[in-house]
Image (spheres, helix red, strand yellow):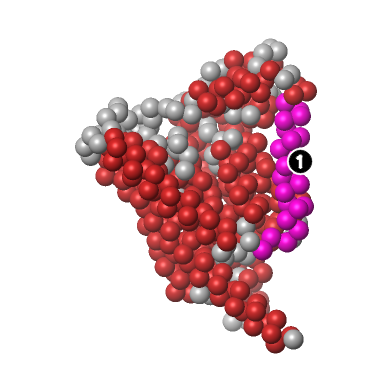
Amino acid sequence: MGTTARRVVALLMWVAVAAVALYLSLQRYRDAVGSDIGTDLRTFVAAADHIRHGRSPYTEFGYVYSPFVAWLLLPFPDFDAAVGPWTAASIASLWGAVAAVTATFWHALSWWQRPLLAGVGLVTALYSPLLSLDLWLGQTDPFLPLVAALAVFFASRNRQVASGVSLAMGAIIKSWPVGLGLWMFRRGVAHRARLIVATVTTGATLLLLTLVVHGPGIFAEWIDRTLTLSEQDLVAYSVWGFGRHLFTQSPALDPLFAAPALGTAVSWLLAAVVVTLIVIALRRPGDDALSMWNIATGVVLLIPVCHLWYFLLALPLLWTWVAHALKGTRRIDSLLAVAMLAVWWVIVFRLPPLDNQFGQSTPQYIAVVLSSVAALAVSVTMSARLDRRTRVSEIHDEAVVV
């Protein structure tokens, strides 16, 4: 195919990707704005209103985030004014996450592979009842893949300061993504000190601003609210929730049978498996992108109160393996990882989400948690195999140079 023909086909592919993504985005936007639910967004707006009137954002009992989220909503006087811009920004953040992942692999992909990767990313992100639920609630989770993907992109360009700033933004938006900080300690980071200093400095800047704006007492309120809401009688899609829900009585989900000691043992066993996988992802990362998303998936599985929509942060793991499959990196391994993650995506993102307070299907809950652990295990294993091949190649190249 000639150069002109390739350009025409590439343009048509990008237009098709944009058209499908815009259609899905409009669907998700209309569903969210028209739902009038906004449980979490209403809490954020109320917290912002407390700030406007000189009170702490934690005056609003359900508010558990840093003041940053409430600051963002200060321009909006009420829920009706905020819901449109907030929903649009949430959807745009997912577009941005896909763009960052595509840009990370841009030079390794051909002219037709780039729009294909972007299309896979946008469709898997936007064609999802899970995303609809997240947007109905007005949660912050769609912003997390963007800041993490930007951290990976900047790292791929050896811009460690920008990577650290992006990485810190995850914990600023929401507390538990502080676990992504483990990514700073993966093997093979160039200029690691710059990354660590930038990350810590960005987080410290938020704390300083919080101190200046709200006074020192805000930190005790923040910690108290976090601890108070760290245990909720809701369906938790984590290794800790798995043992609790399946082997103890609770209103959230029908157990298999009552055996609390067995439930504890199952949770600790799964936790040990996930922690081991995270350690492997740090020691044998594969590449910066695989390491980030493997760690992110493991962190999500270890959160005691893990809502289903938290898995939005793990979704770029699928896109990253698609990129590796397209560029031919250990093709069989990459395709196996893509296949496992595709099954996981169907279970987590395409099935109608269970009710957060009264789960209707114990088998579906089991499928969500176990498929997530299995997908992580396959991904980490294939990443380690890729890492070993890369290290052997580097050693060989060094020997040739000598």
* Residue 322 seen by the camera: no
Q: Position of residue 21 (x, y in %)?
A: 53, 51
Q: Position of residue 193 (x, y in %)?
A: 76, 53
- Residue at label 1? 201
Residue at 41% x, 42% y is: 238
Asked whether, in this view, residue 219 is left or right of residue 34, the answer is: right
Q: Which residues are magenta?
A: 188-210
Q: Mark 1: give few (<14), some (14-19) or many (20+) Cα within 10 Å.
A: some
Residue at 35% x, 29% y is: 357
Is residue 6 or residue 295 the one in the foreground?
A: 295
Asked whether, in this view, residue 171 is left or right of residue 195, the answer is: left
Image quadrant holding the C terminus, namely bottom right
Residue at 38% x, 38% y is: 241
Q: Position of residue 170 (x, y in %)?
A: 62, 41
Q: What secondary structure is the stretch in magenta mostly built from?
A: helix
Looking at the rendered structure, the kind of residue marked 1 is Thr
**Residue 306 forms part of the magenta stretch:** no
Image quadrant holding the N terminus, namely bottom right
Is residue 86 or residue 310 the one in the foreground?
A: 310
As drawn, 207 above or below 9:
above
As drawn, 190 above or below 302:
below
Q: Position of residue 96 (x, y in %)?
A: 62, 49
